[in-house]
């Protein structure tokens, strides 16, 4: 969702779960994370940047192309491919990764954040993309501001009163994912 950020006085885009954006022009990218993870990638030579926001590391069933980018494996691959189409080179990419907090109730749900953190580190290591900054794990949701012109990232820790709204948003998103999978004839493991 594109908007103008009045505080920073910049054109901005807000990423929701399942979104990814790659651009070659300066833009402020913003997202709010609980157990989800966002990867901010940048090729400092070309200036091409991108960000994603994913909820689960990978699939346990065929997604039949229904919002596959909501899964880390696809969100990362789609973002890197899109950045390469804009002129970025994989060997020059650098990553900053955020999120993976334990903000959901229940032992199984609490493991979602941990799984996302392990996944993004492993994926980037395998792809040879160095992580130059990270703020992963914990119990506090974060708001992430990625300034693509400089590569700078600012994190704002959210107050506990925002936690209930974030839990509700993530729960609704998981339910939509399950519904999409059921309609496509597949299943999704939601770590319940």
Image (tube, rainbow, N blue to C red):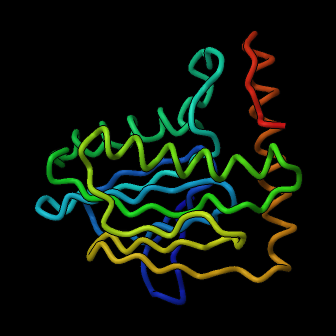
The residue that appears at 31% across and 55% down in the rendered structure is 23
Q: Residue at x 80, y 47 (%)?
A: 109
At horizontal 76% and vertical 44% (from top left) the residue drawn is 173
Name the residue rendered at 74%, 33% in the picture.
177
In the picture, the quarter occupied by the C terminus is top right
Which residue sits furthest bottom? Answer: 7
Left or right of 24, for residue 34: right
Instruction: Classify residue 123 by image quadrant.
Output: top left
Q: Position of residue 157 (x, y in %)?
A: 64, 81
Q: Is residue 123 above or below residue 64?
A: below
Compared across the picture, whether 99 is left or right of 161 comes to left
Residue 88 position, x and y percent, is 18, 49
Tell me the quadrant of the picture where the N terminus can be found: bottom right
Rendered position, 31 above or below 188: below
Q: Residue furthest left?
A: 45
Counting the numbered discs, the total is 0
As drawn, the residue found furthest toward the top would be 185
Residue 179: x and y in percent read 82, 27
Residue 87, horizontal then vertical, whole percent: 16, 47
| Residue 126 lies in quadrant | top left
Q: Quadrant of residue 67?
A: top right
Residue 19 vs residue 71, the one in the foreground: 71
Query: Who is closer to the viewer here, 177 or 141?
Result: 141
Rendered position, 173 above or below 185: below
Whether residue 160 sits left or right of residue 148 in the image: it is: right
């Amino acid at each position: 969702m594109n908007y103008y950020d009045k505080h920073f006085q910049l054109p901005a885009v807000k990423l929701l779960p399942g979104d990814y954006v790659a651009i070659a022009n300066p833009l402020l990218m913003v997202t709010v994370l609980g157990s989800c993870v966002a990867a901010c990638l940048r090729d400092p030579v070309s200036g091409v940047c991108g960000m994603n926001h994913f909820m689960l590391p990978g699939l346990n069933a065929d997604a039949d192309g229904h919002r596959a980018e909501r899964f880390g494996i696809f969100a990362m691959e789609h973002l890197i491919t899109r950045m390469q189409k804009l002129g970025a080179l994989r060997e020059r990419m650098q990553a900053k990764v955020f999120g993976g907090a334990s903000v959901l109730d229940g032992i199984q749900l609490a493991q979602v954040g941990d799984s996302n953190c392990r996944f993004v580190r492993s994926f980037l290591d395998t792809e040879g993309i160095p992580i130059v900054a990270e703020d992963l794990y914990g119990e506090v949701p974060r708001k992430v501001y990625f300034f693509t012109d400089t590569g700078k990232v600012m994190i704002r820790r959210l107050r506990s009163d925002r936690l209930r709204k974030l839990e509700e948003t993530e729960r609704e998103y998981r339910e939509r994912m399950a519904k999409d999978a059921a309609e496509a004839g597949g299943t999704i493991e939601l770590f319940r």
